[in-house]
Image: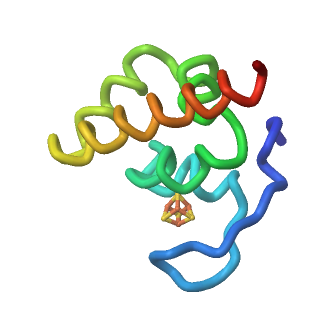
Amino acid sequence: MRKYDHLEMRCPRLGGEVTFSYCRKEGGGLPCQRIITCWSPFFPIEQYLRETMTADAWDAFVRQIPKDKVTTIIELIEEAKKRAKQKNE
Ligand code: SF4
């Protein structure tokens, strides 16, 4: 079991509780397309994925996300970074 795997949340797609371990493999071995949106309020999910996925898997994950969602996710990441920075000041 990896760090964070035990964490649970209510899945907006399935309507029930899921663990992070489910979310990081939901997309046929790749993370769910919504994983950054769902988990970014709880821990630095993008950083975690980049550190734990191979470069090829990360590229495949990013490629599977529709372009408009990539933009949204990048915006969410930037907002999360700003919030974290403000919290540390
Ligand atoms: S990342 Fe995907 S599977 Fe996990 S809670 Fe969000 S929508 Fe559900």
Q: From what the image shows, is residue 81 above or below residue 3?
A: above
Say above or below: 60 vs 20: above
Where does residue 33 sit, x and y in percent of width and height? 38, 51
Q: Based on the displayed image, in which of its 4 quarters is residue 81 positioned?
A: top right
66 and 1: which one is in front? 66
Q: Residue at x 76, y 64 (%)?
A: 8
Q: Position of residue 29 (x, y in %)?
A: 48, 45
Q: Residue at 54%, 20% (x, y): give it.
A: 50
Q: As drawn, which residue projects farthest toward the left? A: 67
- Image quadrant holding the C terminus, namely top right
Quarter of the image with the N terminus is: top right
| Along the viewing direction, whichever of 70 and 31 lies nearer the viewer | 70
- Residue under the point 59% across and 44% down: 40
Q: Which colour scheme appears in the figure?
A: rainbow
Give the image location of residue 41, x and y in percent. 64, 48
Residue 45, placed above or below residue 56? below
Where is residue 16 drawn, in percent x and y? 63, 83
Compared across the picture, whether 66 is left or right of 84 comes to left
Number of marks in picture: 0
Q: Is residue 88 left or right of residue 83?
A: right
